[in-house]
Image (cartoon, rainbow, N blue to C red):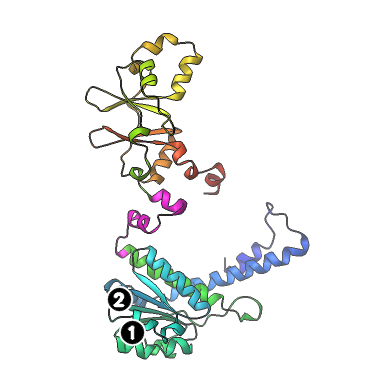
Amino acid sequence: MSFRETVESMSAVPQRDVVPFRNIHQIREAREIIVFEAEALFDVANGLDQRFCDAVQLLLDCRGRVIVCGIGKAGLIGQKIAATFSSTGTRAQFLHPAEAVHGDMGCVSSDDVVLALSNSGETEEVCRLLPIFQKVGAQVIAVTSDEGNTLARGSKITISLGRLEEAGINSLAPSTSTTAMLAVGDALALVVARAREFTPEQFAVFHPGGSLGRKLSTVREIMRSGDELRVAAETASVREVFTKLARPGRRTGAVILVNDDGKVSGLFTDSDLARLLESRSDSQLDQPIQQVMTPRPLTVSPDLTLGEVVSILAGRKISELPVVDEDDRPLGMIDITDVIGLIPTSEDESAA
């Protein structure tokens, strides 16, 4: 089925949406625009050749930074591409062409590779920098419509987008062309990252904030330890454990039990204590806690990511996970309340 046939087959508004009849034409037009751009992206993808690979190699060999350059809408796309390079392990920065000729060219060196963006390839502000790049010794990769324009002729490598028609009314506003630039920029950054074997752990270093950063941080960074941790001998009674290990403030909802060698042998939670009291099993309060503990509990390494731990907590439907060293000695505890914001909801799971 072609893209155009796909659009026609989507002419009806999905049942989950309640859209007034007078607005249905807007939904259809929006779909036309998105599919139009998607169709162009397929053409760009199919047009990639050895020059893309040459560009990747040039970026891999770069000893300096990737300098992304563009103006107008292409400049805004360039800022995002520079950010993608930076976040995936390649040093990069955006250079505004107008600012470049007023002193910012000082940031460019012979060790750098310039990624220049211009659909027409004749953008005056970008093209007038080409002799300066050449004089400095920086090599240029052009992302432009074809190889016959000024930008392409002044660059070492050209990645051609082809003659793209802009989407929407009158086909005037940069839309399809900037979408294609963004896609090519993402492809360059991500292919280079894979070639460098960029790891999730390295990614986490550049993304310490927000939900994404937390998922990629390690258990060691967030686990409860020290005074927040409750550890007791498995031979102690339940009453002794809970009277001697009382803690003010933030604490875990479970006690880690250890054997004579100091290794984790069991887990006893506040919920376990509540069940004993509810069942009126008062006599067990003065018996060794090992008789009522959960033996051989699941434990995790401090080097696991929080994303991995969240999957374990959600999959096993448990609330606490002891953190142990290589000898199974307790280091800390992950409590579900520490990562509650990262637990997928039923809506998230259904969407996935």
| Residue at screen point 30% across, 65% down | 195
The disc, 2 or 1, on the residue closer to the chain's N-terminal end is: 2
Q: Which mark is residue 109?
A: none
Q: Which of 56 and 310 is in front in this view?
A: 310
Using the rendered view, name the quadrant where residue 159 is placed. bottom left
Give residue 221's position: percent from left, percent from top. Answer: 35, 45
Q: For mark 1, what is the residue? A: 156
* Secondary element at image label 1: loop
Task: Reply yes or no: does residue 287 show up in magenta.
Answer: no
Q: Give the range drawn in magenta.
A: 195-216
Q: Which of 5 and 219 is in front in this view?
A: 219
Is the residue 95 above or below the residue 31 in the image? below
Indicate the amino acid at tag 1.
Lys
Q: How crowded is mark 1: few (under 14 residues within 10 Å), some or many (20 or more)?
A: some
Where does the N terminus fall, quadrant-wise?
Answer: bottom right
Indicate the amino acid at tag 2.
Leu
Is the residue 207 above or below the residue 126 in the image? above
Give residue 62's position: percent from left, percent from top. Answer: 28, 74
| Residue at screen point 49% across, 71% down | 42
Q: Residues within 10 Å of mark 2 (few under 14, many from 20)?
A: some
Asked if the residue at tag 1 contacts the one at tag 2, i.e. Cβ–Cβ closer than 8 Å, the answer is yes
Task: Reply yes or no: does residue 205 show up in magenta.
Answer: yes
* Secondary element at image label 2: helix
Q: Which of 282 and 319 is in front in this view?
A: 282
Q: Can residue 34 be seen in this view?
A: yes
Q: For mark 2, what is the residue? A: 58
| Residue at screen point 38% across, 43% down | 222
Give residue 233's position: percent from left, percent from top. Answer: 29, 21
